[in-house]
Image (cartoon, grey):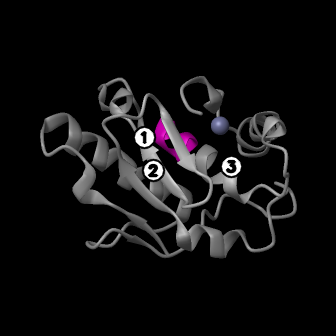
Amino acid sequence: MATLLTNTFPNDKEGRALLRKVRRAIANICGHGVSKKGVVLTAPKKLKPGRDNLKSDYKDIWKKCTIEFDENETGASILMKSYRIRLGPFFLRPSIKVVDMEEVLLHEFLHVALDIKDRQFHHGMMTQILKYNMGYKEDSAIFVD
Ligand SMILES: [Zn+2]
């Protein structure tokens, strides 16, 4: 199970709004909500291992992921070795939608789940997966690393 570190989000109006969007985004991509303790049991169901070129153990990789808010993060990123997905203050703005957070979370997860070693090819593949395979409208690489 991945873990949403709810305590890392600012405890104000904007922080709570972002946390709600992240919870809904996770429910949309994983098919179920986040538990009270922040646990997300299932790997994103919208991803298809064959179609999307995923590592065979991508479900185990999902279990190691954590999702947190980080004041010092400029966009969003994932630490490749520790599987920490970090969301920065950019996403506190009210114009950010649930669907944006879906793309951001999928984007960062794909950096560790794609069966492509060379990171420079990741973003091209993500455009293929998110835009053409899954039907998202925006290009997720706009505001994330
Ligand atoms: Zn990226």
Mark 2 lies on a secondary structure that is helix
Which quadrant, please, contains the C terminus?
A: top right
Disc 1 within 8 angstroms of ligand 1 (CB): no
Q: Quadrant of ligand 1?
A: top right
- Of tags 3 and 2, the one toward the viewer is 3
Ligand 1 near label 3 (Cβ, under 8 Å)? yes
- Assign the magenta stretch its main secondary structure: helix
Residue 12, x across and y down, in percent: 12, 39
Q: Which label sits in the foreground, 3 or 1?
A: 3
**Amino acid type assigned to the residue bearing label 1 in the image:** Val
- The residue tagged 1 is 98
Where's residue 30, x and y in %? 54, 64
Name the secondary structure under disc 1. helix
Identify the amino acid type marked 3.
Answer: His
Q: Dot 1: few (<14), some (14–19), or many (≥20) neighbours within 10 Å?
A: some
Q: Measure the alpha-carbon separation of dots 2 and 1.
A: 5 Å
Tell me if residue 108 comes above or below residue 73 in the rendering. below
Give the camera-side residue of 67 and 22: 67
- Label 3 belongs to which residue? 111
Element type where label 3 sits in the image:
helix
Where residue 74 sits, quadrant-wise, is: top left
Give the amino acid type for the residue marked by disc 2 in the picture.
Ala
| Tag 2 near tag 1, CB within 8 Å | yes
**125 and 48: which is toward the camera:** 125
Image height check: is 62 above or below 12?
Answer: below
The residues colored magenta run 99-105
Query: Disc 3 or 2, which lies upstream in sequence?
Result: 2
- Residue 38 magenta-drawn? no
Residue underneath mark 2: 25
Dot 3 alpha-carbon crowd within 10 angstroms: few under 14, some 14 to 19, many 20 or more: many
Could you tell me how far apart the alpha carbons at marks 3 and 2 are, in whole angstroms? 18 Å
Q: Quick one: label 2, few (<14), some, or many (20+) residues within 10 Å?
A: many
